[in-house]
Amino acid sequence: MQSYAELVRRQRIDEDGEKIPMADVLGREVVVAGFDMRPSNMHKPDYLCLKILLDGEKKVLFTDSIVLRRQCERFADDMPFTATITKRNQYFTFA
């Protein structure tokens, strides 16, 4: 018998895609399919849940990047779009 935690985890993966670290995405072109903001237990601002397609597979990326968050909010009506996530100095941005 499956536990409740396993069921919830599977549902989130089905909805959003597999969780992927930022290091696996940097410098690679992705399709930015959507996003949402989720409350953080560790940081004051909410964190960004970025829904992407990488090599045709659904993935989800979690970050507290304010720059990426602002870019997502600014271009929300234009999603989906292709972009490359890069690191400039101390912050991540779409290029």
Image (cartoon, rainbow, N blue to C red):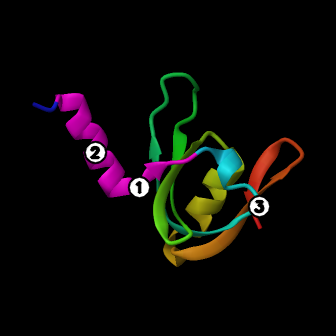
Stretch in magenta: 3-20
Judge whether residue 5 is colored magenta. Answer: yes
- Left or right of 21, for residue 87: right
Res. 34 mark = none
The residue indicated by pointer 2 is 10
Percent coordinates x, y for residue 87 in the rendering: 81, 51
Q: Are marks 3 and 1 in contact (CB under 8 Å)?
A: no
Splitting the image into 4 quarters, where does residue 31 fall? bottom right
Q: Residue 17, labelled with which disc?
A: 1
Asked if the magenta segment contains residue 34, the reply would be no
> Which circle's residue, 3 or 1, is located before the other in the chain?
1
Q: Main secondary structure of the magenta part?
A: helix
> Looking at numbered disc 1 in the image, what kind of residue is underneath it?
Gly
Which circle marks residue 27 in the picture?
3
Residue 2 to residue 69: above or below = above
- Secondary structure at badge 1 equals loop
Is there CB contact under 8 Å for labels 2 and 1?
A: no
Mark 3 is on which residue type? Gly
Which quadrant, please, contains the N terminus? Answer: top left
User: How far, Cα to Cα, is label 3 from label 1?
Assistant: 20 Å
Q: Is mark 2 on a helix, strand or loop?
A: helix
Outermost residue toward the front in this view: 1
Q: x%, y% of residue 12?
A: 32, 47
Q: In this view, does 87 lie to the left or right of 85?
A: right
Distance in Å between CA atoms under marks 3 and 2: 28 Å
Mark 1 or mark 2, which is nearer the start of the sequence? 2
